[in-house]
Amino acid sequence: MTADVFPQPARPPGPARRPLPLSGRVLAGVAGPLLLGLCGFLVVGERAYRFREMAGAQWLVSHALGLRTLLLESPDAPVLYAGDAGGFGRGIALSTGCSSALLIAPLALLAGVLLLFGTRRPARVLLAFALAAALVAAANLGRMTLIVAMQHRYGDEGFGWTHVLFGSLLMMAAGLIALLLFLSLITRTSTRDAEADVP
């Protein structure tokens, strides 16, 4: 008996992904630059974004907590004051490091690049970005509302606990979940994608 060595047959190449239809290319061509522009705005114009973000927190504090609010635009950051009939307490300022802008900007950059140079369906990339960005923005609005509530109730100690400890953990978790959600949505292969790959 002899042992002959036979070369293994070459693995057939996988089916090539079909190019995007015209509607998909148009959507990607329009939405891609818009998302890159959004990324640039969130970095360069983040102060304007912070003021809008703090205005959202003011609305939540007024309606969810029933507190009187006052929003002032200081040279460095918007400052939100909240209180009751007895007057306003200490205000909280929304600095660059506490804004959701720097978490949403990388998602906008990645989504814009994928739309312009990737082969994924544009609708899926846009959905992934929208859900991830909404999650981060909502988490930060909730964090700021909680900080105001705890500061109003417990003073400086309540502010310290919610801002430094709980608020930081909340935003780290929200950022991680948003990134995982984004990646899972753009990398998942649907039945429609699989059928499109079949020659």
Image: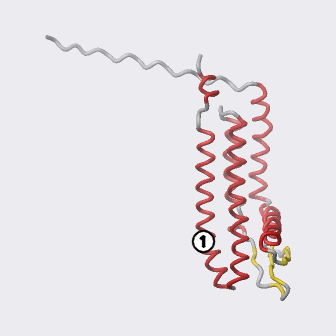
State how the image is colored: secondary structure
Query: Count the marks: how many?
Result: 1
Q: Residue at x 74, y 58 (%)?
A: 43
Q: Residue at x 67, y 51 (%)?
A: 132
Quarter the C terminus occupies? top right
Q: Position of residue 158 (x, y in %)?
A: 65, 81
Q: Residue at x 65, y 34 (%)?
A: 120
Quarter the N terminus occupies? top left
Q: Residue at x 61, y 51 (%)?
A: 179
Type of amino acid at the residue the image marks with label 1 = Phe
Q: Is residue 69 above or below residue 47?
A: below
Q: Position of residue 100 (x, y in %)?
A: 71, 61
State the residue position of label 1. Answer: 166
Residue farthest to the left? 1
Q: Position of residue 172 (x, y in %)?
A: 59, 62
104 left or right of 37 in image: left
Dot 1 falls on a residue whose secondary structure is helix
Q: Quadrant of residue 46?
A: bottom right
Q: Is residue 68 above or below residue 118?
A: below
Q: Quadrant of residue 117?
A: top right
Residue farthest to the bottom? 86
Q: Position of residue 138 (x, y in %)?
A: 72, 60
Query: Within 10 angstroms of label 1, few (less than 14), some, or many (20 or more) residues?
Result: some
Question: Is residue 4 or residue 185 the one in the foreground?
Answer: 185
